[in-house]
Amino acid sequence: MRALLRRLGVYLLAAWVALTVSFLLPRVVPGNPVAGAVARASQSGNCNSQCVQAIEEQLGYNVHTSLWDQYLQYIGNLARGDLGHSWSENAPVSSLIASYLPWTLGLLGLATILSFVGGTTIGTLMAWRRGSSVEWVLPAATFFQAMPYFFLALVLVLIFGQTGTMLKLFPSLFGYDIYTTTPGFNWPYLQSVVAHAVLPVATVILASIAGFMLAMRNQMVTTMDEDFVLVAQAKGLPTRTVVWYAARNALLPVVSNFTIAISLVVAGQILVEIVFNYPGIGYHLYDALGKLDYTLVQGIFVVITLVVLVANLLADVVYVLIDPRARQMA
């Protein structure tokens, strides 16, 4: 329990630093971000004098309160779930993020789980059958991991996407067919969502699975030389049982490295969403930056940071639960 409390303290400190940076960033950057945002808003016709005043208040310009008072107000608003108002969408930032977040979490959760399960399974087989044809999977996976996420996504679109030039098997734009389906709990919409998720999920899996495969293979190779594995083999236990004993112990360091992988996958998924125009947080972050909607950018930055920290904390909890040594050291 003490180990989890220490980790929780570290994550709370990291969250506080991220929130503080989000508050300070538009106030310390060179130039006047308010002027750019107001100019862009005025050109689009979505911003009147009240909108200009709201942008100035949210970013701390032309206000007669100290920076400390602004910071306390900012933290208080966050505690109430108030992330400000987006001028480009003319809606509260919290409601906008609530509509974006399920797309990102669904895509990220599915891709990460498949990548982790598939990578650790293949890594276990490669270690157990060293020298066999199974090991050829690793160079191929490493090749895909060496590609930037956005480049791999473009290659998949070119080969498999309906907007590409070759097989034209899967949709390659948006989260569902925006022209023929109506959002809701109906079969055509759900089928369209699944079809549109195939290429983004495949991109994340191909770009991240090699890390899990390599980590699991290396740990398995080391674990297989341990005494308890040799004794299990000498007793004549079934191969499946021996592999399970070895894999269960080799999996612990892989789970501890899972937290690092989460951050890398989240960063890559932002690029994937941009390529596929997928309606998640990453795509709307890019769109908000282009529109100079700093309030929406701030809100998305805060949510992405908190999601990564929560995912890392959950991975630490799982590690402590499955590894008795972590509880004893606490």
Image: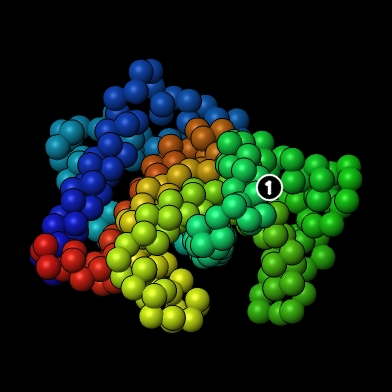
Q: Disc 1 on helix, strand or loop?
A: helix
Camera-nearest residue between 147 and 140: 140
Q: Is residue 257 above or below residue 243?
A: above
Q: Quadrant of the N terminus?
A: bottom left
- Rendered residue at 25%/49% (across/down): 15
Which percent across, then down, holds residue 105?
50, 61
Residue extending farthest to the front is 234
Q: How crowded is mark 1: few (under 14 residues within 10 Å), some or many (20 or more)?
A: many
What's under tag 1, amino acid-wise? Phe
Q: How many marks?
A: 1
Which percent across, then down, holds residue 27?
30, 29
Q: Is residue 81 above or below residue 71?
A: below
- Rendered residue at 80%/50% (across/down): 161
Which percent across, then down, holds residue 258?
39, 55
Which percent across, then down, holds residue 325?
18, 66
Residue 79 in sight in this render: yes
- The answer to whether 193 appears left or right of 280 in the picture is right
- Rendered residue at 23%/53% (across/down): 11
- Rendered residue at 52%/27% (across/down): 39
Residue 270 in sight in this render: no
Task: Name the residue tied to disc 1.
Answer: 276
- The answer to whether 164 appears left or right of 56 in the picture is right
Q: In which quarter of the image is the C terminus?
A: bottom left
Q: Is residue 86 above or below residue 123?
A: above
Residue extending farthest to the top is 31
